[in-house]
Image (cartoon, rainbow, N blue to C red):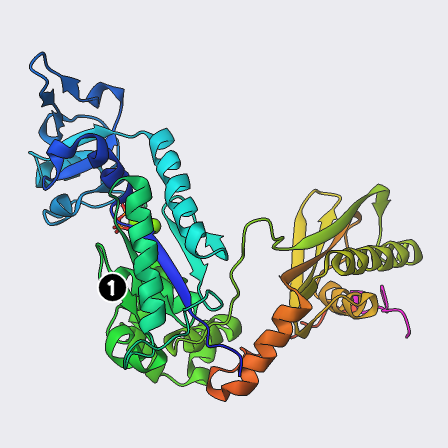
Amino acid sequence: MPPRRLIAHLDMDAFYASVELLRYPDLRGKPVVVGGGRRHQPETLPDGTRRYSLLRDYTGRGVITTSTYEARAMGVFSAMGTMKAAALAPNAVLLPVDFEQYRLYSRKFKAAVAEVAPVVEDRGIDEIYIDLTDVPGAQDTVGHDPLGGVRALALEIKNNVKRVTGGLTCSIGVTPNKLLSKIASELDKPDGLTVLTMEDLPTRVWPLAARKINGIGPKAAAKLAELGIHTVGDIAQCERDWLIEHCGRSYGAWLNDAAWGRDDRPLVTHGEPVSMSHETTFDRDLHAKRDRAELGEIFTQLCSQLARDLTRKGYLAQTIGIKLRFDDFKSVTRDLTLPEPTADATTIRRAAGECLKRVDLSRRLRLLGVRGGKLMTPGEWQARLARAAAAPSRRVKPAEKTVAQEPPAAYNLPLFEPPAD
Ligand code: TTP
Ligand code: MG
Ligand code: MG
């Protein structure tokens, strides 16, 4: 039995504002917003007390980066115009933004996490994913709690962060995957610790607004609302085929997976490549038909180079893509996802050839490139297969083979034919 996946998402609470409160502890418990400039620097008076700028004195066109939870209670949030915020919370304190300081604390909290768990995906200044699956103790049952071990680990991480940063709190969500953990970390903010299993989906996730899923933006949410879909549960109740019909083949399928909490994306850890590619700019612009032989040879070479590169670095690629630049400098890319990842030159060449069929090749070409994405090691692929076999309900998301669109008839020539094997 492979170990069950235990993925954490950690997000710092009111990050910029909390870092500011470390140096201005007298502001604790007050509505504070971060979004001013140098002229809003607090002034230390001769008696040692400080004088702060207040929102009501602000004029200008700035926006707020973040606010303390006390300011949020008055309706003031990230990205709000500072003048608008002033109307809602005139007596809130306004502090200047100090990115240097936030970056310093960002490095500190990430180092604190790395002490406990080495497999970490950086997601920006105040958040990370942490793979706890193989951390000693994570799979342990404590008393009657099968998740007791991982709960204790998450608590240890929270305590580490607090200690190393001199008092900052964060919120952690732990679930079987990144998609659910990102949702879970927000559920009990601030200073939250939320551990969810698939059984919690109907009660904890389905009542949430569809927008809470990372990947459903304002546009998609509006479109779903038009279809009468408002919550994650509403999406889950839709037939997969219906979603595909209304939201597109790949997005519709993804919506269905997301609403049912299915996501097997691995963590992208620091230093690991996200993709590998090879491209070449020609000495003279080449035409798909007239320079077919030459182009075909270059194309095959690029695929072989990519295959060699993948093999040498120990990766397989599940997505193969091409990039073309035309003589008018316009570029197009096409890609397709294979049922299984590969590092094989012939397989890559064939997939790239499929992509090429979906491009109008009437213009001359300046550049041709081949790219391998969705990289994983052979070991990661085996682990995924084993996991899928062990838990058929948590099946590996079937790769959707992109359907090659018919090329325009005039270009329906045996261009760049894959090499016969
Ligand atoms: P968030 O994690 O989104 O917010 P937060 O940490 O302030 O509050 P929460 O407790 O809800 O997580 O963003 C992290 C930091 O990024 C935030 O402190 C300030 C900055 N930020 C902006 O500058 N502009 C924005 O619109 C947002 C959302 C964040
Ligand atoms: Mg945050
Ligand atoms: Mg964040």
Q: Is residue 56 visible?
A: yes
10 Å crowding of disc 1: few (<14), some (14-19), many (20+): some
Residue at 33 percent across and 79 percent down: it is 146
Q: Quadrant of residue 329?
A: top right
Across and down, in percent, residue 413 comes to: 84, 68
Give the overall secondary structure of the magenta segment: loop
Across and down, in percent, residue 324 comes to: 72, 52
Q: Amino acid at mark 1?
A: Leu
Across and down, in percent, residue 368 comes to: 77, 51
SS class of the residue under badge 1? helix
Front residue of 270 and 420: 270
Q: Relative to 333, is 284 above or below?
A: above
Q: Quadrant of residue 163?
A: top left
Number of numbered discs present?
A: 1
Across and down, in percent, residue 45 comes to: 10, 15
In the image, farthest residue toward the right: 293
Q: Is residue 60 magenta?
A: no
Position of residue 412 in the picture relative to residue 137 (left or right): right
Front residue of 183 and 49: 49
Position of residue 88 in the picture relative to residue 328 (left or right): left
Q: Which quadrant would the C terminus be assigned to in this image?
A: bottom right
Q: Relative to 155, is 58 above or below?
A: above
Residue at 82 percent across and 65 percent down: it is 345
In the image, farthest residue toward the front: 143
Q: Which residue is mark 1?
A: 187
Which region of the structure is painted magenta? 411-421
Q: Is residue 417 magenta?
A: yes
Q: Is residue 402 visible?
A: no
Front residue of 311 and 158: 158
Position of residue 15 in the picture relative to residue 303 (left or right): left
Position of residue 211 in the picture relative to residue 331 (left or right): left
